[in-house]
Amino acid sequence: MIPPRRAVPTVDAPCVRECCLDEADECIGCGRTLEEIKAWHGAGVGERETILHAAAQRRAARAARFERRSPVR
């Protein structure tokens, strides 16, 4: 009898298929830097979680910058 396979923890890529790098080489879709995108497949769970956290902070900062630029209606 073959023993059941254990689930290996994974972290899905945050890619939302809106890939476009800004002047800082940060994707405007997922918030990852070019270096983080390139490193993703070789990164472990902990590294991926760190990347996701940093990307979320970048997306929030970008949203706040653009929110301040929006004209008041």
Image (cartoon, rainbow, N blue to C red):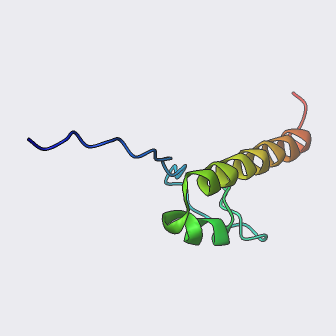
Q: Position of residue 65 (x, y in %)?
A: 87, 47
Compared with 42, 67 (above or below) is above
Q: Is residue 70 left or right of residue 49?
A: right
Q: Which of the image's four quarters has the N terminus?
A: top left
**Most foreground residue, 63 or 6:** 6
Residue 21, quarter of picture? bottom right
Q: Position of residue 71 (x, y in %)?
A: 89, 38
Q: Which of the image's four quarters has the C terminus?
A: top right
**View extreme (front): residue:** 1
At a point 55% along the width and 49% down the height, the residue shown is 14
At a point 56% along the width and 72% down the height, the residue shown is 38
Q: Position of residue 10 (x, y in %)?
A: 46, 47
**Most foreground residue, 47 or 73:** 47
**Most foreground residue, 50 or 3:** 3
Figure label count = 0
The reply to whether residue 65 is visible in this rendering is: yes
At a point 64% along the width and 66% down the height, the residue shown is 36
Q: Is residue 22 left or right of residue 18?
A: right
The reply to whether residue 30 is visible in this rendering is: no
At a point 52% along the width and 52% down the height, the residue shown is 15
Compared with 65, 23 (above or below) is below
Residue 2, quarter of picture? top left
**View extreme (left): residue:** 1
**Most foreground residue, 33 or 16:** 33
Compared with 70, 62 (above or below) is below
Q: Position of residue 58 (x, y in %)?
A: 77, 51
Compared with 37, 48 (above or below) is above
